[in-house]
Image: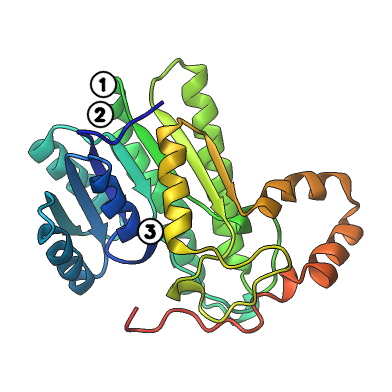
Amino acid sequence: MSSFKNKIVLITGGASGIGLLMGQKSLERGAEKLIIWDVNEEALIKAASKLTRKGYSLSTDVVDVSDHQRVLKMTEKVLEEHGRVDIIFNNAGIVAGKNFEEHSMESIKKTMDVNSLGMMYVARAFLPSMKKHGDGYIINIASAAGLTPNPGMTVYAASKWAAVGWSESLNLELEKTGSSVKVLTVMPSYINTGMFAGVTAPLLMPLLDPDDITTKILDAVERGKARLREPFMVKLTPFIRGILPAKVYDFVAGKIFGVYGSMDSFIGRKNKD
């Protein structure tokens, strides 16, 4: 069992959406301080104003997690100011819903850098300090897209497959070496936020409510879990892919459940989000 009480929590991409919700709920569950990293300075200011009015202690910094030098510099700053970070939510992410040939080389690199390498940079920067203090929890917000192919999100899916593979391998590695640092890999389907505006929810996989899924994530942390897949059909995805021939799985996922057409109506995040 784990607890948020008196813990220092850092969230990347935490100025809005589920990142901000997880930060607020961490404070509500007794976290001592919240540290928010985000690329959107205006959103950081709004988030800080909202939470400080409630009497919470927090700090914010503009950090692009794909910039490993910036991550290292800001990690040093955080550890100098606070001494430690107990819980990290690797939440920063981007998506471009388009066919692969429509991607620029820059958008391919940026998606991979933010969604997969960014998680590794942050975890690698803080892991030695966590191990030194004998405690820590790294929560990696991956995606159900890391479990199944999906046209219209080729690069996003690739970045999340990488994130899932790395996160679950890191968890096993830390367990194998006897470390007390834990890792939680979160693999949700589409969440009803601006990031995936316009998507068509597959059969039996309704859009996840942000408040509900963030509560489940924090509950999973408190229970010391290593894996969270939501909703229920996502839990079955690896099993179904494993037992069905590829063409049969593609028929089931594409024609019956509608997974392969879910991005056809994708609009994406508006500037105001």
Which element is circle 1 on? helix
Label 3 sits on residue: 92
Query: In front: 125, or 209?
Result: 209
- Within the image, what quadrant is residue 204 found in? bottom right
Percent from the top left, x then y, of residue 153?
61, 70
User: How far separated are the C-alphas under marks 3 and 2?
Assistant: 21 Å
User: How far separated are the C-alphas under marks 3 and 1?
Assistant: 26 Å
Percent from the top left, x then y, of residue 134?
29, 20
Q: How many circles with numbers are drawn on the protein?
A: 3
- Within the image, what quadrant is residue 158 found in? bottom right
Question: Are dots 1 and 2 in contact, CB under 8 Å?
Answer: yes
Tag 3: amino acid: Ala
- In the picture, measured across the screen, residue 95 lies left or right of residue 31, that is right
Quarter the C terminus occupies: bottom left
User: How far separated are the C-alphas under marks 1 and 2?
Assistant: 5 Å
Tag 2: amino acid: Ser
Q: Residues within 10 Å of mark 2 (few under 14, many from 20)?
A: some
Which element is circle 2 on? helix
- In the picture, measured across the screen, residue 51 lies left or right of residue 143, that is left
